[in-house]
Image: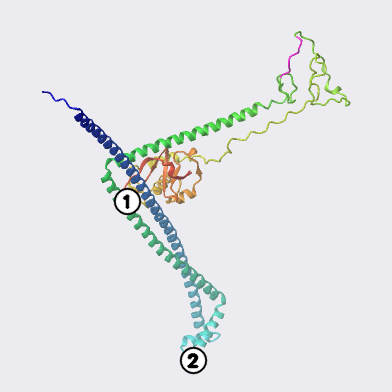
Amino acid sequence: MSFRPGRGSLKVLAAGLLALAALNSSIDVASAQSSDQTKKEIAQVIDEIDRQQQLIDQLAEDHVAALDELTHVQADIVVAAARVAELEGKLGAVQTEVADFALETFVNGDQGGGVGALLSGAGDATVAVERSEYASLAVSAGSSAVDQMGATLHDLDKERALLDGQQRAATELISRVEAKRSATEKKTTDLHKFQVQKEAQLGEQLAAEQRRREAEQLKASQAAIAKAKAQAAADAAKRAATSARAESNVPARGAAVPGGAAPGSGNTSPTPPAASPRKSPPADPAPAADQSPADPGPAADQSPTSDPGADPAPADPAPVAAPEPAPQPDPQPAREIPAPSPGASGAVAAAMSQLGVPYQYATSNPNVSFDCSGLTAWAWGQAGVDLPHYSRAQFATLPHVSQGDIEPGDLIFSYNPISHVGMYIGNGQMVHAPHSGDVVKVSAVRWQNVTGIGRPG
């Protein structure tokens, strides 16, 4: 006997199917929500890594800046120490000169008796007498040596004070350098731990999202470069067309104007044809020289005669110079763009030769380690251009160009304050030393972070 469900059981079955469909639907929705939440979390993690890395870059740049300042102070200390040594030698020479003269005075006889009293150890040589005898010696030796000794002592005191101040400044700078170094290393360690933790939680999705972002940035940068070049070409074509139109509107001097108008009369419209179909002999034009001063007709009046059947009057008045066409301004004022450096290709080749070299802040050691400004300074140094090992100083010393004028070899500075620099190599890409834990590599330019572009040369 076969089972035939009744109406009640059919209702139960339908309700079950609907419940199952609703359950599947809710699972799909929950799965989609979970995926969206994961993507959102991945994006937040990447943004946080970028933010932390930017802080590290700023600390590293501050560290390099302190090192640069310390280098200059130490150089000043060397100069000041040499100056102190020079003055000490000069003082010793003057003192020797005075002592030699005193000895000579004692041996050959003391005219004033003061030196003999001093050197004989007489019991009545009091402090007052001693001062008097030194004064006598100064008079005997001449005031020039004593004055020179006093001036040398004064200069020496000043140089010693300057040297002491520079040495104190150097000590403070060393403390600052160490503090910046410690802060940079701690921040770098914290970021590394954060990355390891998040990579363990999110696995391959984090790396995939990072690759996707880099691909989008590369595509966007290439599109921006192409758009800028196309705009520059369009502007150049527009300026050329405007210039050509302006030249075509100015006829050559003495050239005939179409329509029979006198050259320079300003009338470029053709003369209307005669009403009669038959060809009548042309009227002899009156020479301009025969025109009577009593002729009331104005020179510019070229209106037809009152007789509608008559031929148009010849253009016999004196020619009127055509107004010069107004100069057409360029769509954009011309900008003075620094010419690309002849060493750009060499600098790019040098930077590219260091691909894979580890990042280490405050270093510029070929085939060993670089930080961002150390790489660009070294690479351009190979092309014969000296740059400071400090990205903000590099930006301050270089002429700047726009994104549309960028060329390989130009330096791209990022963030505000500037804390990173890379070298443009074309097609929206740059070679750079990114950050701790990474190596010298080629990456897409993140134009949204770019502060400016510098052109060495």
User: Residue 443: x, y in percent?
Assistant: 37, 40
Q: Which residue is outermost to the front? A: 7
Q: Which residue is outermost to the right? A: 294
Q: Which mark is residue 221?
A: none
Q: Residue at x 44, y 61 (%)?
A: 73
Q: Which residue is outermost to the bottom? A: 124
The image quadrant that residue 163 belongs to is bottom left
Determine which residue is flagged by label 2. 124
Q: Which of the two residues, 4 or 428, is positioned nearer the viewer here? A: 4
Q: Which residues are magenta?
A: 270-276
Alpha carbon distance from label 1 to label 2: 82 Å
Q: Residues within 10 Å of mark 1 (few under 14, many from 20)?
A: some
Q: Image check: 315 left or right of 154?
A: right
The secondary structure that most of the magenta stretch takes on is loop
Q: Which of the two residues, 310 or 75, is positioned nearer the viewer here? A: 310
**Residue mark closest to the camera, 1 vs 2:** 1
Say whether residue 392 is visible.
yes
Secondary element type, mark 2: loop
Say whether residue 109 is visible.
no
Secondary element type, mark 1: helix
Is 272 one of the magenta-colored residues?
yes
Determine which residue is flagged by label 1. 191
- Amino acid carrying label 1: it is Leu
Which of marks 2 and 1 precedes in the sequence?
2
- Amino acid carrying label 2: it is Asp
In the picture, the quarter occupied by the N terminus is top left
Is 65 one of the magenta-colored residues?
no
User: Residue 403: x, y in percent?
Assistant: 48, 40
Q: Image check: 63 left or right of 399?
A: left
Q: Which residue is outermost to the top? A: 278
User: Residue 367: x, y in percent?
Assistant: 33, 46
